[in-house]
C-alpha cells in the first residue's frame, strides 16, 4: 500500500524529523522515497540525509508532481506562501497531510481550490521513536482509500485516532503539546531528587521509568487514573503527603489550565489567520 508512495515533507524542522525517524524505522516506506524540503537551510537537509537516508531538497528543487503524499510541516505563519505555490502545482490525486497546529482543513481546501484531499494531523515529537499519539481529521474530499493509507502511514509513528475536527484544538492541548508538560514535570522531579543528593544517573532513569510505568498501567488496565492513584496512596503515608502538597499548590488546576491554554492558542491561530480580505495576519 505504501511501498510505492513518495512522501514529501514541506518543512524540515523538529516535527518533520520526528515523523521521518518513525517512518524510516518502520521500513514501511523505503527511505529513498521520503523527501524533506525547506526554504534554504541546506546544512539541515544534509544532516537529515545522513541520519535517515532520505533525500533533502530546497523548496525550489522539489518537484511536487513526483509526490504522492505531501506533508505540510511549516509554522502556521508560513502556510500561505507554501499553499500559494502548491496551488499551482498540485494534481487532484495528491494527498495533503497538514501537521500545522490551528489550521483547519477548510482553510487549506479553500486556498488550494481544486477539491484536493486534505487531512489535518496532530502528532507529537514521540513520533521519533514510534510512540506518538496522533489524531486525524478528514477533510471534505478524502476517500476511504486515502484514509486507510494515512492511517497506515501514521501508525508507523505511534497510535492513531480519527477525531472530529472540532476536537482538534483540545487534542492539540493534550497530546500535541503534551510531551512538554511531562518533560517539565520530569525536569522538576529530577532536580528535586538531585538537590536531595540522589545520583544523577539514578534520578534520570528512575523519573522516566516511573512515568513509563504509570503510563503502561493506564494502557494495560481499564482502571481509572483516580483509582490507580488511590492504590498508591496509603492512609497517612508518603503519597498522601505528596498529593496534599500538589493539591495545596493547585497542581490539578495548573495541569487543566495548561491544556486549556494550549487549546485556546490553537483556536486563536485559526481565528487570527485571516483578516476580512482572507489574508494572513498572524506573525
Ligand atoms: N514541534 C512539535 O512538537 C509539533 C509541531 N507541530 C506543527 O509542526 C509544524 C512545524 O513545527 P516545527 O517542526 O517545530 O517547526 P520548525 O521551525 O522546526 O520547522 C519549520 C520548517 O518549515 C520550513 N519552511 C517554512 N516555510 C517553508 C516553505 N514555504 N517551503 C518549505 N519549507 C518551509 C523551514 O525551513 P527553513 O529552515 O529553510 O526556513 C523549517 O524547515 C508547526 O506548524 C507546528 O504547529 C505539530 C505537532 C507537534
Ligand atoms: O507548540 C506548538 O505550537 C506545536 C504544536 C503542538 C506542539 N508543538
Image (tube, rainbow, N blue to C red):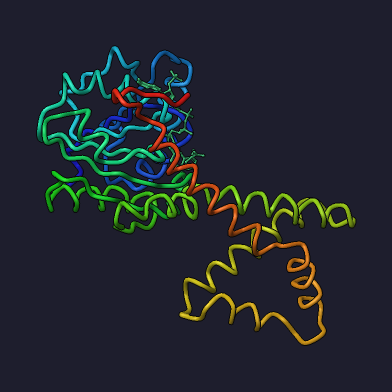
Q: Give the farthest residue toward the front.
A: 276
Q: Give the farthest residue toward the bottom.
A: 235
Q: Residue at x 69, y 56 (%)?
A: 205
**In front of the other: 160 or 207:** 160
**Left or right: 38 in relation to 28:** right
Across and down, in percent, residue 7 comes to 25, 34
Q: Residue at x 55, y 48 (%)?
A: 261
Across and down, in percent, residue 81 comes to 32, 19
Across and down, in percent, residue 111 comes to 22, 28
Across and down, in percent, residue 128 comes to 46, 44
**Left or right: 220 in relation to 4:** right
Q: Is residue 279 above or below residue 20?
A: above
**In front of the other: 195 or 118:** 118
The count of marks equals 0
**In front of the other: 27 or 186:** 186
Q: Residue at x 68, y 54 (%)?
A: 185
Q: Residue at x 53, y 69 (%)?
A: 216
**Left or right: 124 in relation to 198:** left
Q: Is residue 94 above or below residue 57?
A: below
Q: Is residue 30 above or below residue 156?
A: above
Quadrant hosting residue 53: top left
**In front of the other: 15 or 274:** 274
Amino acid at each position: 500500500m505504501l511501498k510505492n508512495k513518495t512522501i514529501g515533507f514541506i518543512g524540515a524542522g523538529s516535527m518533520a524529523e520526528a515523523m521521518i525517524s518513525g517512518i524510516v524505522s518502520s521500513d514501511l516506506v523505503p527511505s529513498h522515497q521520503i523527501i524533506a524540503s525547506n526554504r534554504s537551510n541546506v546544512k539541515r537537509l544534509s544532516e537529515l540525509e545522513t541520519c535517515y537516508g532520505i533525500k533533502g531538497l530546497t523548496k525550489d528543487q522539489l518537484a511536487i508532481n513526483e509526490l504522492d503524499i505531501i506533508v505540510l510541516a511549516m509554522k502556521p505563519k508560513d502556510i500561505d506562501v507554501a499553499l500559494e505555490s502548491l496551488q499551482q502545482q498540485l494534481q487532484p490525486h495528491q494527498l495533503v497531510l497538514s501537521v500545522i497546529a490551528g489550521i483547519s482543513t477548510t482553510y487549506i481546501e479553500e486556498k488550494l481550490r481544486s477539491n484536493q484531499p486534505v487531512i489535518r494531523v496532530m502528532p507529537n515529537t514521540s513520533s521519533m521513536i514510534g510512540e506518538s499519539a496522533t489524531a486525524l481529521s478528514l477533510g471534505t474530499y478524502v476517500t476511504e482509500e486515502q484514509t486507510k493509507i494515512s492511517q497506515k502511514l501514521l501508525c508507523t509513528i505511534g497510535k492513531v485516532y480519527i477525531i472530529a475536527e472540532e476536537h482538534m484544538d483540545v487534542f492539540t492541548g493534550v497530546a500535541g503539546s503534551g510531551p512538554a508538560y511531562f518533560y517539565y514535570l520530569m525536569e522538576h522531579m529530577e532536580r528535586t531528587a538531585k538537590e536531595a543528593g540522589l545520583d544523577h544517573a539514578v534520578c534520570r532513569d528512575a523519573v522516566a521509568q516511573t512515568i513509563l510505568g504509570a503510563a503502561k498501567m493506564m494502557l494495560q488496565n481499564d482502571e481509572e487514573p483516580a483509582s490507580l492513584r488511590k492504590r498508591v496512596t496509603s492512609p497517612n503515608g508518603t503519597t498522601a503527603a505528596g498529593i496534599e502538597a500538589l493539591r495545596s499548590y493547585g497542581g490539578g488546576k495548573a495541569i487543566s489550565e495548561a491544556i486549556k491554554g494550549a487549546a485556546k492558542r490553537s483556536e486563536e491561530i485559526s481565528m487570527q489567520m485571516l483578516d476580512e480580505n482572507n489574508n494572513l495576519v498572524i506573525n
